[in-house]
Image (spheres, rainbow, N blue to C red):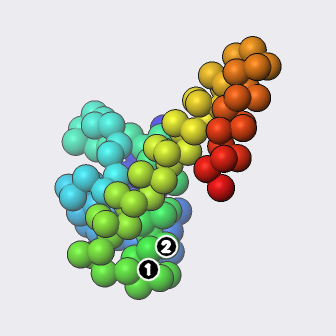
Amino acid sequence: MMRLEAVVALFPDLETVELSGWIERRWVLPEPAAGGDWAFDEIDVARVRLIYDLHHDLGVADEAVPLVLSLLDQVYELRRRLKAIMRALADQPHEVQAAVLAALEDQD
């Protein structure tokens, strides 16, 4: 777990007040820590990096960031669900797997 100041230090021109604003807007959701600080895990830091890149490198406006984050969250949730389906399908008999693959081919 990393504290707020340690996360800010990872980025050349990210200010504490800016990252705090992202937390207030709920773009990133670290855990509350002692003394009013925040504790960031790896996923939180990755999300900060994404928001930083969107905002600083790509110039995405603050108003568009929630939309971009929402769309990316949907993509990741879809990927998670597809992986779960693939694991469930892998546990099925060969006949069921073949039937599902045949049904998918019929969709093309």
Q: Where is residue 21 in the image (x, y as percent from the top left)?
A: 23, 63
Classify 10 Å Cα crowding around label 1: few (below 14), some (14-19), many (20 and above): few
Asked whether 79 or 102 is in front, the reply is 102
Q: Which amino acid type is marked by label 2? A: Asp
| 67 up-or-down from 40: above or below | below
Q: Name the residue under label 1.
A: 56
* Label 2 element class: helix
Which of the numbered marks, if any, corresponds to residue 41? none
Question: In the picture, residue 27 is in which quadrant?
Answer: bottom left
| 34 up-or-down from 23: above or below | above
In this picture, residue 60 sits left or right of residue 98: left
Q: Name the residue under label 2.
A: 53
Classify 10 Å Cα crowding around label 2: few (below 14), some (14-19), many (20 and above): few
CB atoms at circles 1 and 2 under 8 Å apart? yes
Quick one: which residue is furthest to the right in this view?
94
Quick one: which residue is furthest to the bottom in this view?
59
Q: Is residue 10 visible?
A: yes
Q: Position of residue 51 (x, y in %)?
A: 42, 66
Q: Which amino acid type is marked by label 1? A: His
* Label 1 element class: helix
Q: How far apart are marks 1 and 2 (CA)?
A: 5 Å
Quick one: which residue is furthest to the front in this view?
106
Q: Is residue 20 visible?
A: no
